[in-house]
Image (cartoon, rainbow, N blue to C red):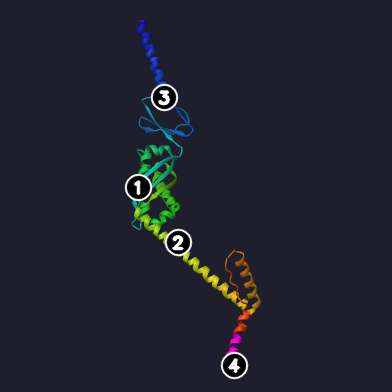
């Protein structure tokens, strides 16, 4: 009988060791242990060494670090009836592990579904131009709405970022034509403003030259030197204004004599 008793004692000791090892849980600093004893919720445990009674208590480890949830591309219709495909990324963390385990079956799946529905609803409330230009405003709106939904689950939404907005090819061509027309309009306006400013400067210059004929002669001489420095084969020399005026007066005098 001694061999049988010794084997039974060894098996009993082995069972005790296995149960003892199974009852020991090491909870890291960024984790918390949610324990149910015979179905009843117990106070939060961890971090450190946590003992769980086998067959009596059940444990769930919850990560408190910031988690990410990729929102797959979703087809949505904007306020101005444009079909777009939008995908986003959600950053969140568990602030109340007890609620995250008891208030919802699977908090990760719940936050994913909440992100999907909220993204579609928010896109439908904005026009395409707002979606492309005011992305920060839409991200803030998504964060507020998803955070409001996930608060009863003990989850805090850190931030929501729209990663990409895919526009139909036809709409892309229309937007490119509109942008080109806008650039052409801006260029024409700038050119018209430059011409108006140049005409004002020329008017002012002509008025100053009329007051000082010598300024006209100096400008003529400067223009001749500039033309000569460019290695042109033909150089046009303008006659001084006094010669032109004298020739005109002489012609009028001779015409009067002839009469």
Q: Position of residue 192 (x, y in %)?
A: 49, 69
Q: What whole-number distance in Å separates the C-alpha atoms at marks 2 and 3? A: 72 Å
- The mark closer to the camera, 1 or 4, is 4
- The mark closer to the camera, 4 or 2, is 4
Q: What whole-number distance in Å separates the C-alpha atoms at marks 4 and 2? A: 64 Å
The answer to whether the residues at label 2 and label 3 have Cβ atoms under 8 Å apart is: no
| Residue found 35% across the figure and 8% down from its top | 4
Q: Position of residue 85 (x, y in %)?
A: 36, 49
Q: Quadrant of the N terminus?
A: top left
Query: Label 3: how many residues lie within 10 Å, few (<14), some (14-19) or many (20+)?
Result: some
Q: What whole-number distance in Å separates the C-alpha atoms at marks 3 and 1? A: 45 Å
Q: Earlier in the sequence, mark 1 or mark 4?
A: 1
Q: Which residues are magenta?
A: 248-258
Residue 103 visible? The answer is no
- Residue 56 sits above or below residue 247 on the image: above
Question: What residue is disc 1 on?
Answer: 74
- The mark closer to the camera, 2 or 3, is 2
Q: Earlier in the sequence, mark 4 or mark 2?
A: 2
Q: Nearer the viewer, residue 43 or 179?
A: 179
- Residue 48 sits above or below residue 67 on the image: above
Q: Earlier in the sequence, mark 2 or mark 1?
A: 1
Q: Nearer the viewer, residue 135 or 4?
A: 135
Q: Nearer the viewer, residue 60 or 145?
A: 145
Q: Quick check: is 254 in the magenta stretch?
A: yes
Q: In terms of secondary structure, where does tag 1 sit? A: strand
Prevailing secondary structure of the magenta residues: helix
- The circle on residue 23 is 3
| Residue found 52% across the figure and 70% down from its top | 195
Q: In terms of secondary structure, where does tag 4 sit? A: helix
Task: Say how many tags the image has.
Answer: 4
- The circle on residue 257 is 4
């Amino acid at each position: 009988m001694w061999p049988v008793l010794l084997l039974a004692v060894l098996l009993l000791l082995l069972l005790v060791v296995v149960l003892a090892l199974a009852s020991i849980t090491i909870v890291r600093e960024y984790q918390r242990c949610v324990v149910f004893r015979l179905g009843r919720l117990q106070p939060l445990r961890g971090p450190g060494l946590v003992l769980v009674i086998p067959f009596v208590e059940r444990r769930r480890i919850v990560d408190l670090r910031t988690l990410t949830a990729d929102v797959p591309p979703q087809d949505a219709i904007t306020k101005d009836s444009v079909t777009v495909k939008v995908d986003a990324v959600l950053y969140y963390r568990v602030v109340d592990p007890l609620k995250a385990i008891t208030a919802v079956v699977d908090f990760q799946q719940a936050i994913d579904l909440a992100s999907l529905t909220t993204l579609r609803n928010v896109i439908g409330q904005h026009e395409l131009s707002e979606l492309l230009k005011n992305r920060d405003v839409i991200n803030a709106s998504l964060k507020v709405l998803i955070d409001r939904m996930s608060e009863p689950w003990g989850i805090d939404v850190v931030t929501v970022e729209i990663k990409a907005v895919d526009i139909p090819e036809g709409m892309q061509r229309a937007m490119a034509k509109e942008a080109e027309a806008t650039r052409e309009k801006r260029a024409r306006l700038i050119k018209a403003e430059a011409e108006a400013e140049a005409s004002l400067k020329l008017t002012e210059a002509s008025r100053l030259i009329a007051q000082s004929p010598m300024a006209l002669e100096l400008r003529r001489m400067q223009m001749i030197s500039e033309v000569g420095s460019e290695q042109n084969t033909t150089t046009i020399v303008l006659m001084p204004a006094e010669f032109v005026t004298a020739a005109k007066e002489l012609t009028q005098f001779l015409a009067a004599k002839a009469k």
